[in-house]
Amino acid sequence: MKLRSYLVVTLLLVVIAGGAAIGLTLKPAEAAIASHEWLNTTYQGEDGFYDANIVAYTVSDNVSDNAELIARIDNPYSADISIDYARLKLGWSSTPLDATEKPATIAAGGYGLVIWDFTVPSASTASNLLMHSYNITIQYDITGGLSDMQWYDGGGNLVFYSEDQSACRVLVEKWTVNNSKYTFWGYKGQRAMTEAWYLYNKAEDEYDSGNFGAAKADYETAVQKQEEAIKSDAGAALTPTSAQALEGTGGMKGVGYLIGGIGILIVALSLGLGIVFWTRRK
């Protein structure tokens, strides 16, 4: 009886040890697909219409964008792995897309890059009103080990802008850059910006509600009013023509030229008073 119990315990220990050894040998690191990134995008960031952080390409009536996705694949094993396939499943299509480029093997502890390249689909295929999913599958074999293993990754924030949406994004960027480079100091400039801000906020609301055509028109007018206000404000600080010629419409530059002008005026007045005083002494 004692011998039987001993054999049972021994067998259990062997099974447990063997299972642990297999687990330690075959278990991959958590992030085998270490990262992925979309390249040559129209825009990446927060978008009020989708209320999400998005990756956007543009669909055009003439020539659509070419989308490119690159993924880094890490080999966490102590043996080489060979890549059977690398596929990208796009939410609007039932057919997975094979990688344009992929490594045949990845050395133990090394990494490889996988690239997918495809033309952005038409709006009738992938609506610009929705976010679309994408899923990566990497199938691989471990040298001297298991075969047909798989890693997965993906997301659900891929969008395809219409031409109006894309134009809105360009105008928002222009507005933001102008504001970051110029600080209004005069009352006239600040007053002129009131209408520009009204139109910009109106365009924001229109864009967020999906009225992209109206948003584009109001963004355009807002940027036009903004640039007119900058020229007016800088012109008040300098001369009517010097602001743009000297590229002094950027906040501190405009103030710098203003201070320089005041300095010249003070020097001129000082010289004038000196001449008067010298003449009177004679």
Image (tube, grey):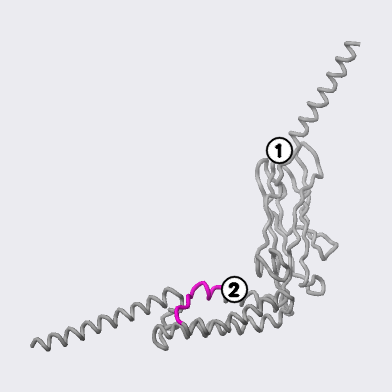
In the rendering, at what x and y percent does residue 224 appear? 57, 84
- Identified by mark 1, the residue type is Ala
- In the image, taking residue 185 as reference, residue 119 lies left or right, namely right
- Looking at the figure, which quarter contains the N terminus? top right
Q: Is residue 182 magenta?
A: yes
Provide the residue designation for mark 1.
79
- Identified by mark 2, the residue type is Glu
Which numbered disc covers residue 173?
2
Residue 108: image quadrant is top right
Q: Residue at x 61, y 85 (%)?
A: 221
Considering only order in the chain, which callout, 2 or 1, is on the residue closer to the N terminus? 1
Which span is picked out in magenta?
176-186
Q: Residue at x 42, y 85 (%)?
A: 236
Residue 139 lies, with reference to residue 46, above or below; the image says above
Residue 66 lies, with reference to residue 141, above or below; the image says below
Furthest toward the top, the residue is: 2
Q: Name the foreground residue: 143 vs 166.
A: 166
Q: Name the foreground residue: 20 vs 107.
A: 20
Residue 256: image quadrant is bottom left
